[in-house]
Amino acid sequence: MKKSSYALCLMIITLSIILTSCGGTGLLSKNKVTIEMVYGSEKEEWLVPLIEEFNKAKNEIESGEVIEIEAIPMGSIESIRRIISQDLQPVVWSPASDIVVPMANAEWKKEHSTDLVSDQFNYLVLSPVVIAMWQPMAEALGWPDGHLGWSDISQLSISEEGWDAFGYPEWGSFKFGHTHPNFSNSGLVSVIAQAYAGVKKQRDLTKEDIESTELTSFMQDVQSSIIHYGKSTGFFATRMFERGPSYLSAAVMYENLVVAQETKRISGESSQLPVVAIYPKEGTFWSNHPYIILNAPWVDDEQREAAQIFEAYLLDTEQQEQAIQFGFRPADPAIPLGFPLDTNHGVDINQPQTVLEVPQADITIGIQDLWSQVKKPVDVVVVMDTSGSMHGKKISSARESLGQFIGLLDDRDRVQIIFFSTEIISINELSPLANDREELQRRVSAISEGGGTRLFDAILNAYQTMEKSGNEDHIRAVVVLSDGMDTDSSLNMEDLINQIGVTDEESGTAIKIFTIAFGNDANKEILNQISETTGGRPYIGNPDSIYDIYAEIETFF
C-alpha cells in the first residue's frame, strides 16, 4: 500500500472513531454547564416537556458551553430543609409559592451572612389557592351569588347537623381536607389563611394575634372536620375526584387542579359531579411558582448565566401560552386568559379579589406551632410482620423504624402495636402516647422473628380493634407492614375485603389502612387492594427506605 493511501485510511479511521464518540454530531464534544433545578411538582406536566425541548436545542452560554437542565420535583417545604442542610445543592429553586421564601432566608441566615434568596425574582406561572367543592354542595351554601370562605367552613365543621342543616341529610357530615403544613405548600397556605380569617385581618399578623384564644378556637373548629392530612396536594385531588363526595366535601388545592378535573369530566374521562373553585372571601394566596437562582456558594457565574437563559425561555410568550392548557395562568399579564380557564371548568378568572400578605418567618412558624396544638389527633394501630422470613436486616430495620415512627407522633395521639407471625400478639391497648412512648419504644426494640404469616387475620384483628376502641372524632388508621404471603390465616382475601370494605360510615371518615409491602417477596397486589379498599395508601419498601415511608405516613396524621 502506498504511503499516501495508508495515511488516508488512517485519517478516515480516526475520523470515524471521533464521529462515533461524538454521536455523529460533530468532530468535538462541547463542554456542558449543568443546571440542577428543584421545583414544585404541581407544574410538572407543563415544565417537563419544555425542559426536554430546551435540552434538545442545545442552547449555549457566551463561552460556548451547552446548557443542560436536570430537574427534580419535590415538595416546597421538604426542599427548604434539604437546601439549608446542603444535602441538596441546586442552582434553581422553584417552590410552589413565594410564601416559603422568608422561612428559607431565616433558616439560611442562622449560619450565613447573606440571604439565600434575593428580593429580585420572577414568577413562572400562577394559580390561586382555592377550596375545591362539589358544585351542588357549593350551591347549597349560596354559591355563586353568595361569597363563601373560612367562616363558612368553620361553621360547617362544628355543626352536628352537617348538611342536614341545609336540607340535604343524605349528604351526611361535612368532610374537609388540606395537606400537612409542615410538609406541603398548600397545607401551609391553608393554616395561614385560617389564621388571617380567625382574627379578621388581611395583613399585619402579630404574635399577639396567633396567641389569641379567639384564633385557637377558630382553627380548632376548622380542623375538627379534617378526614386526614397528607404530604401531597395531588393525592388529595386524586382521592377526592376518584371517590366523590362521600370521601371529601371540599379540600384546599390549586385552581389548576380544578380545571384539570373539569376537563376530564367534560371529556367523559370522569363520571363525578362538577367541582368548582371557591375563592375565600377573607382572602387567599397565589401559588406563583417563583424562579429563584440561589445566592449560594455552590452557584458559579456560568451556572447563573445558563439559569437566566433558561428562565427567559420559560417566560417567552409561546411557553407561557402553553401553561394555559394545564389550567395555569401565565405570569405575563399581557397574555389573555381563555379556554380552559372559564366558568365551564369551575373557575372565575376575575378572582381572587383579596390577596393576603405573606407573613414574616417567625409568624409563619408560630402558626405552624398553633396548628400542631389544635390539629385533629390520630388513633393508629400498627400491625407488623414478625414471621421467620423477616430475619436479618429486615427485622432490625423494621424494629428501628417503628421506634422512630412512634417518636414522630404527638402526645395526644393514641397508638396500639400488634405483632403477627403464627400468633397475633398485641403489646398494649389503644392509649395516648403521652405516658407510654418510652415503654413502647423499649418493647419494640427487642422483638424477634419466627413462625408463619397470619396476615389476613392480623389485619382484621386490628381493624375490629379500631372499630371498637377508636374515637370517631379522631383520624383512625391501621398501618400494616408485611414481607410475604399469608400462610396461616383462617380468613382468605375475599373474606377480609368483605369485612373491611363494608361499613356504615362515610368513606372519608372511615378507618384507613396504609400498607407497606416490605421486600421483594411481599404480595404487593394484595396489599394494594387492601389499602385501596379503605381509601388508604399502599407503599413498597425495603430495609433502606422503610423509615422514609413511615415518615410519609405520619404526614397523614
Image (tube, rainbow, N blue to C red):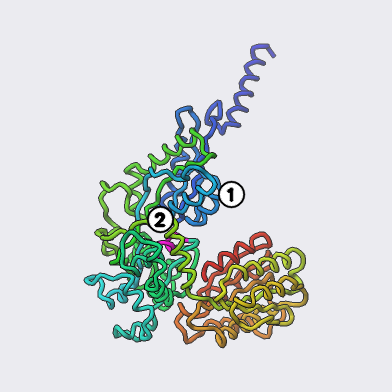
Q: Secondary structure at mark 2?
A: loop
Q: Position of residue 371 (x, y in %)?
A: 46, 68
Q: Position of residue 416 (x, y in %)?
A: 63, 79
Q: Secondary structure at mark 1?
A: loop
Residue 42 can be seen, yes or no: yes
Q: Give the residue number, with chain letter if any, for mark 2.
A: 360
Farthest-out residue, left? 145
The 10 Å Cα crowd at callout 2, few under 14, some 14 to 19, many 20 or more, is some
Q: Which residues are magenta?
A: 184-190
Q: Give the residue number, with chain letter if any, for mark 1.
A: 87
Task: Tell me what residue is drawn at x 56 percent, y 68 percent.
Answer: 553
Query: Do labels 2 and 1 touch, CB within 8 Å?
Result: no
Q: Position of residue 204 (x, y in %)?
A: 33, 59
Q: What amino acid is at disc 1?
A: Asp
- From the image, give the main secondary structure of the stretch colored magenta: helix
Task: Tell me what residue is drawn at x 48 percent, y 75 percent.
Answer: 376
Q: Position of residue 108 (x, y in %)?
A: 51, 48
Q: Is residue 187 magenta?
A: yes
The 10 Å Cα crowd at callout 1, few under 14, some 14 to 19, many 20 or more, is few
Mark with earlier residue (2, 1)? 1
